[in-house]
Image: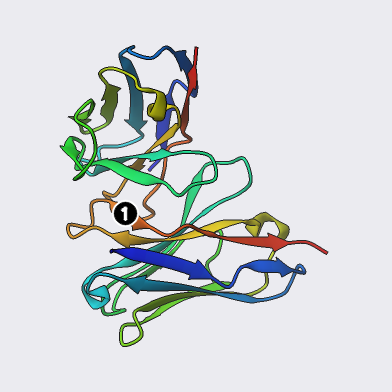
Amino acid sequence: EVQLVESGGGLVKPGGSLRLSCAASGFTFSSYSMNWVRQAPGKGLEWVSSISSSSSYIYYADSVKGRFTISRDNAKNSLYLQMNSLRAEDTAVYYCARGARGDDAFDIWGQGTMVTVSS
Amino acid sequence: IQLTQSPSSLSASVGDRVTITCRASQGISSYLAWYQQKPGKAPKLLIYAASTLQSGVPSRFSGSGSGTDFTLTISSLQPEDFATYYCQQLNSYPPTFGQGTKVEIK
């Protein structure tokens, strides 16, 4: 079964750091681009970051540039999001999502992990 | 690129035909996807490349459009279709989402 499972969310104080992980299974992880998308409570979807299959291309939303770092380990079938200098507005459910073959959709999504930034 | 969905919400009955519109602030060819999200769940891909149905998605869902104007149509609304629907453009970074359309029971 094709599956993505996020972990690493939790409660963190403003200015703190957190590292999210996404474990992939059921497909050849190294062949696909991967993405992080977040959703603040009661709000819509916001793209956060993307990484190509070989990590050659990396993109960030302006709202997280310079604070978040996306990475992947194809040997471990894992995607990561290192989040530093966290702010209250980063509070959200964070989803990892697989880029479809033609990079024309996000075709597989994880269940999400909640990040709460609060003092 | 900004995506504007309309309406933001709608009330409909089982069996109704429902149409949701997504307008892009500039041309995006056919690089548009539609997702369905139910409360507490992850989004689910319904349509990609503006009109291609994702495997396993019921044929009552269809998409059309190119350039700046796109539509998602549900031909006969079913109880399990009550959810929020999002469009997303993948023509260029950042891959933005529309604000969502909530489909509620009338």
Q: Could you tell me which residue is drawn at 44 percent across and 67 percent down?
A: A5
Q: Secondary structure at mark 1?
A: strand
Q: Name the quarter where the C terminus of chain A is drawn.
A: bottom right
| Percent position of residue A13, x then y | 77, 69
Q: Looking at the picture, tell me which residue is in the foreground, B70 or B36.
A: B36
Q: Could you tell me which residue is drawn at 31 percent across and 83 percent down?
A: A74
Q: Could you tell me which residue is drawn at 28 percent across and 68 percent down?
A: A33
Q: Is residue B97 above or below residue A110?
A: above
| Percent position of residue A25, x then y | 32, 72
Circle 1 packing at 10 Å, graded few (<14), some (14-19), many (20+), is: many
Q: Which residue is mark 1?
A: A106
> Which subunit holds the residue at mark 1?
A
| Percent position of residue A78, x then y | 39, 78
Q: Looking at the picture, tell me which residue is in the foreground, B106 or A39.
A: B106
| Percent position of residue A42, x then y | 62, 40
User: B13 left or right of A107?
Assistant: right
